[in-house]
Image: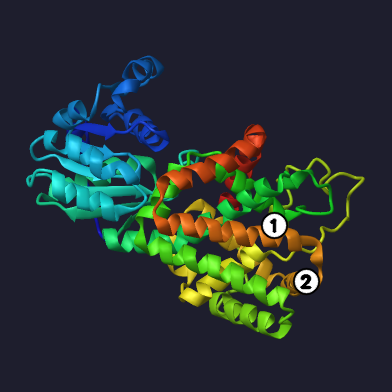
Amino acid sequence: MEVPTVSQTQIDDWKIDMKIGIIGLGDMGLLYARKFSEHGWKVICCDQEKFYTENKKLYIDEDFEVVLNGHHVSRQSDYIIYSVEAANVSKIVAEYGPSTKVNAIVGGQTSCKDPEIKAFEKYLPKDVDIISVHSLHGPKINPEGQPLVIIDHRSSRPSSFLFVNTLMSCLKSKIVYLSYEEHDKITADTQAVTHAAFLSMGTTWAKLKYYPWTLGLDKWYGGLENVKVNISLRIYSNKWHVYAGLAITNPAAHKQILQYATSVTELFSLILGGHSEEFRDRIMKAKEFVFGDHNGKLLLDSSLLDKYSLNKADHTSEENAGKKPLPNSHLSMLAIVDSWYQLKINPYDHMICSTPLFRIFLGISEYLFLTDGLLEETLDAALYDNSFRKDDLEFVVSARSWSSIITSGNFELYQEKFEETQEFFRPMFPEATAIGNDMIKTILSHSK
């Protein structure tokens, strides 16, 4: 889409006359508040009223203003962004929407747009334009170069669209224009199954009561294992609602997550039954569907993947140099590619709207399926080596459990299961976060 150029004079006038309001000072709301105010925009924010006094003190040196509640934000602001949990967006818009300034613009940055847009249509005054956004990355990722979706759902004034584009340009993200229906379908395709895989990995290790990186060089060692461990811990170091909203409130995500649990179960059943020919045939069909047109260049390589281990006995030391990791069944990754095949999803179709986690998981899936000899080694391990059989059995249980919770729409049960696993890994979060941040930064830089 061609967006008309806005003069610097117009931008300067907007910065004088217009206020940006952010309702919700969670991690992403805070990221937006800081970025906008750093670039000279007038920003006012609020969180829950019970945090008002604390936030006033906490952010006293920031360039944005903290006010009591969403009524104060809505009455003063020319562009209001609801940065709240998807599960609560309707209730919060119902409360503060009627206070919206005349002829203002309103948007949200929830990960699922269907409930957000419906809340705006129901509770906002008719003179309000609706232009939503979604930064497809977490708050710990630099937004520069990352996808940012802008959804022009209802705008009666051309200046509204230009204003939102100009404001968002300070994030230096790659802007993509979609409808809210397209957004929800793409985010389900690129994020739902990826999150389900990593959530299930973490839950499996917690149920087995071990930290996988402490098992020496026998198991959970090497480049692919480093990514699995680091990304899983990265997810569990965040707040549960970051992932619950996308999974539970997005109907398209339910289908993906149910298929992932089905793929995990069916592949494991073939392994247990010794149906080697059927198992190999199914995996090879999935490989052909997903990677059949691959150009030969992998998103990731082993020299990157091997660097970021939590394992103190990693192979980079002189003592362990040259030692090879134990072959792994990689059931979690085989099931991802099988899910894409069963649902006829081409993961490369949505790269422009992909999150960092999705690009990394696609990268390690490529690495597994397209590195010479690695897939065959993995299939042999799955069929004939019992070393990971106990882990895989627990993984099947975890994947099915997460699928059941998500399709039931039970936020409380989601939170309980997430935080139970989170507590098990909590002692490792500081070290894992530091290593994971470095790994993601390097991988994303390499894959540009």
- In the image, what residue occupies the spot 59% across and 43% down? 421
**Does residue 227 appear to the left or right of 260 in the view shown?**
right
**Does residue 158 appear to the left or right of 236 in the view shown?**
left
Q: Which residue position is annotated with label 2?
A: 377
Q: Nearer the viewer, residue 165 or 190?
A: 190
Q: Position of residue 212 (x, y in %)?
A: 73, 47
Q: Nearer the viewer, residue 46 or 168?
A: 46
Q: CA distance from mark 2 to mark 1?
A: 14 Å
Q: Which residue position is annotated with label 1?
A: 224
The amino acid on which the numbered mark 1 sits, given as a three-letter code, is Leu
The amino acid on which the numbered mark 2 sits, given as a three-letter code, is Glu
Q: Secondary structure at mark 1?
A: helix
Can residue 353 be seen from the camera position used here? no
Mark 1 crowd level (few <14, some 14–19, many ≥20, 10 Å Cα): many
First along the sequence among labels 2 and 1 = 1
Q: Is residue 286 above or below residue 44?
A: below
- In the image, what residue occupies the spot 38% across and 14% down? 57
Mark 2 crowd level (few <14, some 14–19, many ≥20, 10 Å Cα): some
Can residue 408 be seen from the camera position used here? yes
Residue farthest to the right?
Answer: 319
